[in-house]
Amino acid sequence: MTTVFFTSLPHRSVLKLSGTDRVRFLQGLVTADIASLTAGAAAWAACLTPQGRWQYDFFVIVHPHEPCLLLECAAIQAEDLRNFLYRFRLRANVDIEPSSLSVHVAWNRTTWENSTPLCQEEQIPPVLTAYCTDENTLYVPDPRLKEAGWRLINAPSALLSKISLTSFSEYEEHRLTLGLTDGVQDCEQGRTLAAEANMDILNGISFTKGCYMGQEITARLHYRHLLKQRLIPVMGTADLPPTNTPIFCHGVEVGRLRSTSKQRGLAFLKLEALDHPLTCDNQILTAHPPAWMKNAPPPHL
């Protein structure tokens, strides 16, 4: 029987976007195609600057029982994101309110090295279908990667009592091994390009939906093969140093560390340096581009 791992994400919050114009309103602001989502489905999306730089990223979930969209975002950015979206409301019939909904994540222990972009839903663990029966409880497959598992909104007490919570550090190991960004930990507001955070590979950017803020720059990078660095999983020979520690190749800086957990981490690395020896804070560092990245079609790795 497959073991299901289950972790609370108290650093995540949920905003509720309602109103008759909610889909059209959000469609014109974010990187993902919100208009194509069906009830109960989710998308990973970002709001960019006009120059295509990251500001906020979040999961958009179409509530299957209420006329609203749920925006699962970093709690530290929730109020700023709400204020940012309100700036563009104008006469649109939308309302954006905070909620008290909790966020959890569940996943199976699968072969990380063979992970691939989400093409079909992984089989839903019976424990979720058995205990998440209340219509106020939602669980959706993570739209980035099937091995990432499921996002749970408002998990019921019956489920919480049934499954022992896994430590947050184990979830971080899971995330870092898969190479999944946590926006506020890994991206720099107003500086990081969406494709540098691998949003173009992991279903976070639509290149067919039409205009959104930052779309022109994002599309130009994609079609002209101009991207120079990406967020890459790395491993050290000891516990990794703090965020933003420089990474060197033959004495030349080629990247910077972002989020870390013990010997694992994510780092922005120049693509030309991936196959060369790396050092960080006087220790050897090894890049581990996952299969979903190595197998991505041009202009990606």
Image: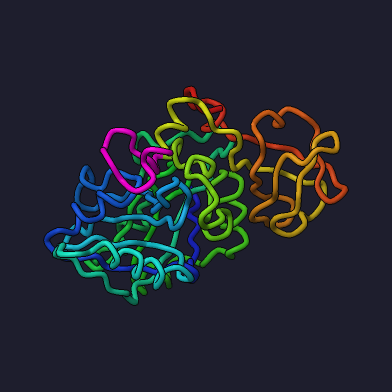
Give the answer, above or below, for where 296 lies relative to 199.
above
Question: Which residues are the magenta region?
Answer: 203-217
Q: Is residue 54 left or right of residue 129?
A: right
Residue 191 versus residue 172: which sits nearer the camera? 191
Residue 209 located within the stretch drawn in magenta:
yes
Give the answer, above or below, for where 214 lies relative to 86.
above
Q: Is residue 93 left or right of residue 267?
A: left
Residue 77, image x and y in percent? 45, 68
Residue 224, image x and y in percent? 47, 25
**Dominant SS in magenta:** loop
Q: Is residue 283 left or right of residue 64?
A: right
| Residue name at image x 45 percent, y 42 percent | 199
Residue 69 located within the stretch drawn in magenta:
no
Q: Farthest residue toward the left?
A: 20
Residue 195, image x and y in percent? 49, 40
Q: Farthest residue toward the top?
A: 298
